[in-house]
Amino acid sequence: MDSLHAIGFYVSAALAGAGGLFLAFTDSRQRRAVALGLVGLGVAGIDLALSAGFTALVVLICYAGCALLAMRPDHRFLEQAASGPWRQAGAVGAALLLAVLAYAAFRGNFAHATFNGGPFGSVAVGRLLFAHDALATEAVGGLVLASLVGAAGAWRRERPRDERGEGRR
Amino acid sequence: MSVTLVAVLFVAAGLTALGAFIAAWKRDLTGALTGIPVMFAGAGVAFVGVARFGASSGAPLLGQEMAVLLAIAALSAVGLGIGLAGREGSR
């Protein structure tokens, strides 16, 4: 991997991390969408630097869709049932998860192989998706269909405005 | 300056933990839902990194395929969650 790709990788990783941190500490829907877009852009850059151009394109489209969904002004504000101590315990659990995963990455003895694929790889990934692992692709297609039907069915019913969410929009 | 599998896995660990933190920390449920794509992004980066640096036998681009499927699953999870949260009335 040359220096240009390495710089692209680290810049994209910083962009994704900054977007994730911004997403964690912002409450506005527009800013949340921008942060999710930054995460998508960063992850697509990482994929591109790792010679996965087709994956980068799909990630960019999917995360742009996530950002547009998160930006919608008319979805309801629903407060979590978990109280402060439980949320703090969840945050500590996330920190522990980071420690465990970072330790596993640092101490792991990984095999190193030469990469023979191209920079984009759409043909090879397409063959995998539609020939080698067609069942997995169909399962994800079924999941997307079920979630879209469920979301559309739930979205049709208008619910009363939640007073607690008034100040957040 | 070079990129190794360990560096990729560090980034993936950071994104996964950040997604878990967002899901746990956000008071708004639809806000907490945005932690799912970040977690899936971490998993996808790890898969792509293994496909780039460590896949020596079998289908070498299997990790890229998994990352594609994870991105699509993240989009459908956010869509379903926001749909289930429901639409606010106009009054």
Image (cartoon, rainbow, N blue to C red):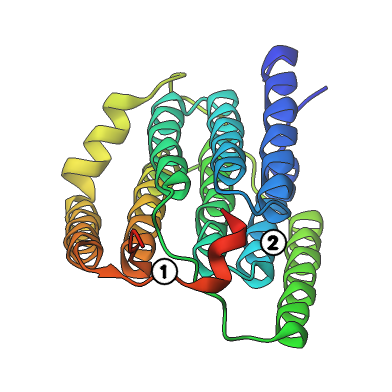
At x 38% / y 27%, what residue is drawn? A54
User: Residue B17 — which label?
Assistant: 2
At x 75% / y 34%, what residue is drawn? A14
**Residue B11 seen in the current view:** no
A54 sits left or right of A17 in the view = left
Quadrant location of residue B49?
Answer: top right
Q: Position of residue A147 (x, y in %)?
A: 24, 62
For residue A134, above or below residue A95: above
* Near-viewer residue (B30 or B58): B30
Q: Position of residue A151 (x, y in %)?
A: 25, 62
Query: Tag 1: residue type?
Result: Arg
A139 sits left or right of A111 in the view = left
Quadrant location of residue B7?
Answer: top right
**Residue receiving disc 1:** A161
The subunit carrying tag 2 is: B
**Residue A58 seen in the current view:** yes
Q: Secondary structure at mark 2?
A: helix
Q: Position of residue B25 (x, y in %)?
A: 69, 69
User: Do callouts 1 and 2 mark residues in contact (Cβ within 8 Å)?
Assistant: no
For residue A46, above or below residue A160: above
Query: Tag 2: residue type?
Result: Ala
B45 sits left or right of A147 in the view = right
A68 sits left or right of B23 in the view = left
At x 40% / y 59%, what residue is drawn? A75
Mark 1 → mark 2, Cα distance in angstroms:
33 Å
Nearer mark to the viewer, of 1 and 2: 1
